[in-house]
Amino acid sequence: MKNLLVGNEKRKATTDIIIIIGVLLLAWQLLTQQLGLLSNFLYPSPQSVLGQFKADGAELLAHLVASVKLLASGMILAIVLGVPLGVFTASNKRLEFVIRPIASVLSPIPPIVWIPYAIAILPSFQASSTFVIFIGAFWPIFLNTLNGVTNIDSRYIKSAQTLGLNQYTMTTKIIIPAALPSIFSGVQVGLVLSFILLTAAEMIGSSAGIGFYVKLATDYGNYTKVITGIIFIGLIVTVIMTLFHKLEKHLLRWRS
């Protein structure tokens, strides 16, 4: 019964979203083409943007591949380091008392301020972008993992200890699964920050990527391409976040 109600609410929400998008597209069409209230130079019509999508389809896909490579390299590095370090830090109270004050100082620093410095000292744009994306994603992943492990109900740990489990089994079968919801929350925050940092980095010093596509179009005053790039970024972010939530739902299906 509960699943049926949830399914109905989701279908209603989907219908509402479609209606909202339809209204926005209609308003866009009216303001730019029918009524002419907005400048065609700064506010291209829906037809112009759709035509630009068709004309630049192959170019956009090539830029997408370049962006995904950078995003994946930074995110994977942040997950590979952030999760184990978070688990290890939580297992050692003395280390935790040292790391938390340091993290409270470093983690609030906006990662975007590292972009000019990273570009200046690292050997390539790819290395500097990977570093900045890594910094942006690492702290939420690390801190959420640390908090997730710290907040595990002590009864679970004590019950596992009575079974004589070794540390490896304890970590992989008890600690990480119990902290997984918190870990996923950290990865989600890191992923959102990574998109922002990726686009910003590409607009500063890249020769490829979706951010570069938008920046180049802006430099030449081609706002049809600018709007096309913005919409394309929104679509890609939506797809990636949808896939992420499906993966999260699958791995955390035991919570249902």
Image (spheres, rainbow, N blue to C red):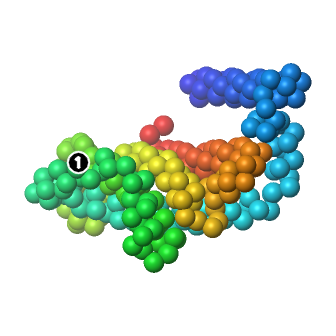
Q: If the image is split into quadrants, where does the N terminus sit?
A: top right
- Residue 28, quarter of the rendered image: top right
In the foreground, 201 or 105 = 201
Residue 251 location (% of width, % of height): 49, 50
In the foreground, 20 or 1 = 20
Residue 124 location (% of width, % of height): 50, 75
Neighbourhood count class around disc 1 (C-alpha, 10 Å): few under 14, some 14–19, many 20 upward = few
Q: Is residue 159 above or below residue 59?
A: above
> Residue at left 17%, top 50%?
101
Residue pointed to by mark 1? 104
> Residue at left 39%, top 59%?
114
Residue 159 visible in image: no
Residue 153 visible in image: yes
Q: Is residue 122 above or below residue 106?
A: below
Residue 188 location (% of width, % of height): 47, 47
Please tell me how many numbered marks the rendered image carries. 1
SS under mark 1: helix
